[in-house]
Image (spheres, helix red, strand yellow):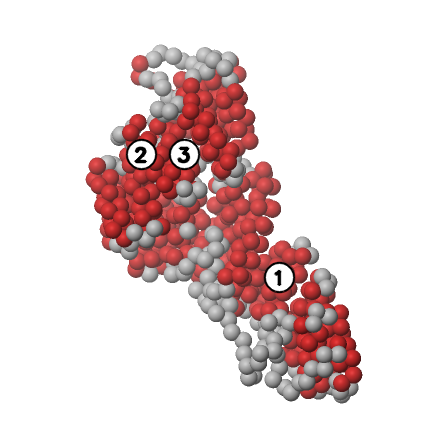
Amino acid sequence: MAGDSGSTRLRIAAAVGVTLAVGSTAYLLWRYRRCHGLPSKRRDPDGGPASTLPHKSNGAGADSLLQVSAEPSVESCQAAKNSGNDLFRAEKYTEAVECYTQALALCPSDRSPELATCFQNRAAAQEKLGKWEAVLHDCSRAVELNPKYVKALARRTRANEQLGNKTAALEDITAVCILQGFTNQNSMLTADRILKEMGWEKARETFKNRKSVLPSTQFIRSYFSSFVEDGIGDVDLSDTDDSSAFITALRHLAAGRYESVHPECEREIEEGGSWAKEAQLLRATFLLLVGDGEKALEDLEFLIAAENISAKVIVNALIKRGSLHMQMQSPTGSIADFERAAKLAPNNADVFHHRGQLFMLLERIDDAIADFEKCIKLQPDFALVHAQLAFSKYRHAMVNENEPAVKSCLNELESVVNKFPKSTEACALYAQALTDQQEFAKAEKMYDNCISLEPDNATPYVHKGLLQLQWKQDLEGGVELISHALKVDSKCDFAYETLATIEVQRGNLERAISLFHHAIELARSEMEIAHLLSLCDAAHAQSAVMAKYGLRPPF
């Protein structure tokens, strides 16, 4: 459960002066209005205003075609279209299609707006009949005549989805969102849904074929520091002459030689040494770190079912399997593992710490607070958990809009920083809360503290860069700091994703796509890859829309 929280990533859009409306795709809106002539209570099938030309409905269905003049003119076209509208409202869609077809035949060829409307209306009737190829054809004709025709683009989105053309559907709904200024929630939700579907469709294959890469030294160090009773390192390396492969692995781990840990674990397991079970747990841990969840799960399940094994090893395996279940989007399985671990070891602080993090992800803030408090009772000097408890209380106060409690929680976070001045996590969480409250100068000081405490930690540079964007609107300064993060740690996926998101906002789409791909190479789960692929697809779609229609987002 270690690493950057999802809520932190949601700050990216706000930091570049926009509001995150739906998930991680960061679409935003202004209201699109369309007016044709005088207002009318009658409306076309697509919800648009009907023509203000004189029209008398005879309610006769297809017979109304007989009243339309055979001579091409705007008036005769309008009369046929109005008859089609009456039939549409009467749910006589086949007859409506015939009227709209006649309206198209009667419309002068130089009247593009009227032709586009007739194609769009006929598409609406074809949609009711489930004739998706015809809908696609008519919407495409309407868009050819009027490239900014929002309703035709929206309807063509649905047709492309029905026909399995998701890339085309995404391009159309992207154009719709841009034309609406990213303010229509329904369009935003459609775009978000399509992006997520596309991301998940590609994620499994991408994840399967990716090269396993260890995360940064800082990430691995932070991960292991989030456990105080892991059952792996319960050996005093300074007071042992044990030369087994597992003890050698522990020496590599302590020295930060992480690439050498896994091979020594393999050797201990193959030799059937006295530390084989502990070696298997350490191997599973490194498999989790490189994102090989399937192999890690095999080791963890073997250990959980094993006999004559240390309780600490079983509990740690349950915690890690519970976290893995959450990565696999199975919160029920995750909670079950943590409950089992809590019953086996009610005095193991790690259980309550990591379950508290799970509850935060599930927005069960009260449960998270209770677990963090239990953890602190068991491990009073666990600085990270003190910070997480105070931040959980802050989140709870914010959700309940309790201003006095918010101020109290800010004071508590400051107290944690003062009590544990060497805790990077305490400074970072306090800085996040200060940024929420727009106390930017104090937040910047906290990020500077993080950097001085851990110069090789790239994440504070990213947060400080985002702070410059939000506080000072200093785009270049912010980008410089985030770029520096990658010099500090070339494996900081958060920096790649953040820079890519900023480049999307700046319109540098090729650069954004390249940065997203760097982040994908470092992703450790299918869920992360699906998220990043959806962002990459959004950038591709925006690029295509710019090329086709010359449309740029209003950022």
Type of the residue with mark 1: Thr
Is tag 3's residue or tag 1's residue first in the polypeptide sequence?
1
**Could you say where residue 45 lies in the image, as x and y percent from the top left?**
64, 72
Give the answer, above or below, for where 27 lies relative to 218.
Answer: below
**Residue 524: numbered disc:** none
Q: Nearer the viewer, residue 367 or 169?
A: 367
Separation (CA) of disc 2 from disc 3: 12 Å
Tell me the quarter of the picture where residue 157 sits. Answer: bottom right
Q: Is residue 161 left or right of residue 520?
A: right
**Could you say where residue 512 lies in the image, as x and y percent from the top left?**
48, 54
The residue tagged 2 is: 373
Type of the residue with mark 2: Glu
Separation (CA) of disc 3 from disc 1: 42 Å
**Could you say where residue 1 lies in the image, as x and y percent from the top left?**
42, 36
Count neighbours of disc 3 (C-alpha within 10 A) and say few if under 14, some if 14 to 19, many if 20 or more: many
Report the mark closest to the observer, 3 or 1. Answer: 3
Residue 191 visible from this viewpoint: yes
Type of the residue with mark 3: Arg
The residue tagged 1 is: 157
Is tag 1's residue or tag 2's residue first in the polypeptide sequence?
1
Q: Nearer the viewer, residue 419 or 225?
A: 419
The residue tagged 3 is: 355
Q: Is residue 32 left or right of residue 357?
A: right
Q: Secondary structure at mark 3?
A: helix
Tell me the quarter of the picture where residue 355 sits. Answer: top left
Residue shown at 51%/52% (left/top)? Answer: 535
Q: Secondary structure at mark 2?
A: helix
Residue shown at 43%/26% (left/top)? Answer: 341
